[in-house]
Image (cartoon, rainbow, N blue to C red):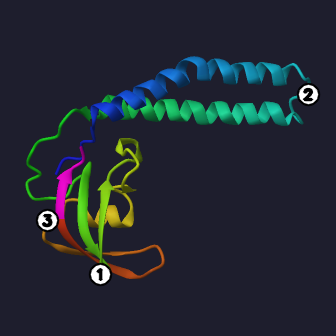
Amino acid sequence: MSSQTWLTQEAADRLRAELENLEGPGRKDVTAKIEAARAEGDLKENGGYHAARDEQGKMEARIRQLKQMLENAHIGTPPASADGKVGAGMVVTAQIAGDDMKFLLGSREISSGDLDVYSEKSPLGSAVMGADIGSTVKYTAPNGKEITVVIKAAEFYA
């Protein structure tokens, strides 16, 4: 099973707009904040300066994350067949500890907010990743309990 990330066109457009904003006006704003705080004098005890530098670091990290995500994503409609296996970018219907649940396996970036999202690296995500539809898998939750998951269906998120 490949670990390709599929983005809808809407999600890709939203991420590109965020990246464009961060690289343009966002960088100018944080630079202006840093310059204004620098003008206040002593940088060792200047809380505004340190806060602006922290904001700049977080913004640059987000820019790198968005660039990497957009560079490696496949945009459009994923293949019609999932070969009967659960993969990234899929909406999984499962029975988890006796309760029916639907969730998106992948990144929050591709979701429009209507589903719970679990990373492929989360305990639940790594348990179901690559599993056959109709199979039963188990994983250990962060609290130490072993949880049984029955995979009922999986389809690509649209």
Q: Is residue 94 above or below residue 105?
A: below
Foreground pick, 53 / 93: 93
Judging from the image, what secondary structure is the residue with disc 3 in?
A: loop
Q: Which residues are magenta?
A: 153-158
Dot label at residue 133: 3
* Residue 129, position as x, y percentages in the image: 24, 60
Question: On the image, numbered disc 2 is attached to which residue?
Answer: 42
Judging from the image, what secondary structure is the residue with disc 2 in?
A: loop
Mark toward the start of the polypeptide (1 vs 2) = 2
Q: Is residue 110 above or below residue 99?
A: above
Kind of residue at disc 2:
Asp
Magenta highlight on residue 157: yes
* Residue 95, position as x, y percentages in the image: 26, 74
Mark toward the start of the polypeptide (1 vs 3) = 1
Numbered label tally: 3
* Residue 43, position as x, y percentages in the image: 86, 29
Front: mark 2 or 3: 3
Specify the principal SS of the magenta part.
strand
Foreground pick, 10 / 36: 10
Question: On the image, numbered disc 1 is attached to which residue?
Answer: 98
Q: How many other residues sit within 10 Å of disc 1, few (<14), some (14-19) or many (≥20)?
A: few
Judging from the image, what secondary structure is the residue with disc 1 in?
A: loop
Callout 1 touching callout 2 (CB < 8 Å): no
Q: Is residue 44 above or below residue 28?
A: below
x 68%, y 24%: residue:
30
Front: mark 1 or 3: 1
What is the residue that sits farthest to the front in this orientation? 114
* Residue 39, position as x, y percentages in the image: 87, 19
Kind of residue at disc 1:
Gly
Kind of residue at disc 3:
Ile
Instruction: Answer with the quarter of the image where residue 45 lies.
Output: top right
